[in-house]
Every structure is written in C-alpha cells, then in structure tokens.
Image: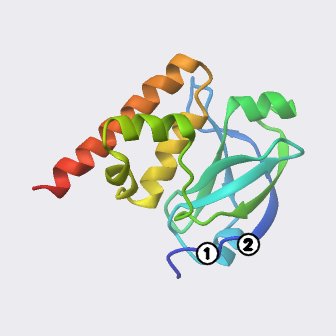
Amino acid sequence: MRTSPPAGKQMSFQAKLENWAEGMDYCAVAVPASITKALGTKAAVLVMARVNNSEPFKVSLFPNGGGKHYIRIKGKVRKETKTKTGDRIRIRFTVLDRADVTIPDDLAAALRSERATEDFKSLPPGKQNFILRRIDEAAKPETREKRIQEAVEEAHARRETKNR
C-alpha cells in the first residue's frame, strides 16, 4: 500500500453514527474497507469532509487496526446536521495534501515574537496540521490563545530536540 493517497481524491459513503466511548460524547463512523482499499494506505489520511449537507470540516481518517479507518464526527457537526447516535449519515470527503500547511495570522504572530517560526515549520506536516486543527476548533477565544501558546511550546521543544 502507498503511504499517502493523492490529494484531491474525492470519495463518499454512508454509515451508521456510533458512540465510540461509553459515557462520553464521542461519535465516529467506521470507514468501509472498500474506501480504505481505494485510498491505498493504512495510515491516517487528512481530509476535508461533509456530513450530509454540513459545512466542510477538516479531520483525519484514523487507522483502527486490521487495515480499517474511522472518522470522528464532532458534536458541532452532529448538532448542525441534527444527527444522533444510530442515525445513518452520508460522508463526502476530499483528500488533502498533508504538506500544505497554512499558519493562521495569530499563530504566525506568536511564533514570530518567540522567534519560533522555523522551528514550527520543521515539525512534521501531520503534527503541524493536528496543532492547527486544535487551534481552529477552539470554541472560546481564551481556549484558542491557550492552544496557540501550546503550539509555540511545541516549536520550542522541536528546537531543543534539534539542538541535541
């Protein structure tokens, strides 16, 4: 299997929304084996997804063992689409280029002020995208600020490991 599917590849499937963590609001759907096979990888795949007619959102198809993937459906998306555990949903997604990383202005300013921009850019693209998604998904300004500071700390930690 290839290590990453081609960016721009579009796919869709239907599946039942499942609760993946008893007692927690953590829902996901299993990606059909035919989709994983068509993607050509057992690794995480960064995508821009839609559930039913939702606004697009960035998420990863995560490996789930045995050559399978799952996709997490956050509460915000379930609320927007009025879906709940047990509902059958349609997922459409486009594979993104993991190396195509756009740093938001507020994070760029924080990295510049700490002289950590190059250190952040030296993080693996998957790590950068994970950090950026966490920042973008912050519901409150104070949470966003906290996550920006955590990103700066990640950049500093990268500098320290490079200098060893």
The quarter holding residue 112 reads: top left
Res. 64 in view:
yes
Residue 13 placed where, x, y %?
Answer: 81, 60
Specify whether 151 is left or right of 142: left
Q: Which mark is residue 9?
A: 2
Q: Which mark is residue 25?
A: none
Specify whether 116 is left or right of 53: left
Res. 151 in view:
no
Residue for point 31% across, 42% down: 115
Foreground residue among 93 and 155: 155
Query: What secondary structure is marked by label 2?
Result: loop
Specify whether 84 is left or right of 105: right
Q: Circle 1 sits on which residue?
A: 5
The three-letter amino acid code for the residue at tag 1 is: Pro
Query: Considering only vertical position in the picture, is 117 above or below 82?
Result: below
Query: What secondary structure is marked by label 1?
Result: loop
Query: Considering only vertical position in the picture, is 146 above or below 101?
Result: above
Real-space Cα separation, disc 2 to disc 1, in angstroms: 8 Å
**Quarter of the image that includes the C terminus:** bottom left
Residue 131 placed where, x, y %?
Answer: 47, 43
The three-letter amino acid code for the residue at tag 2 is: Lys
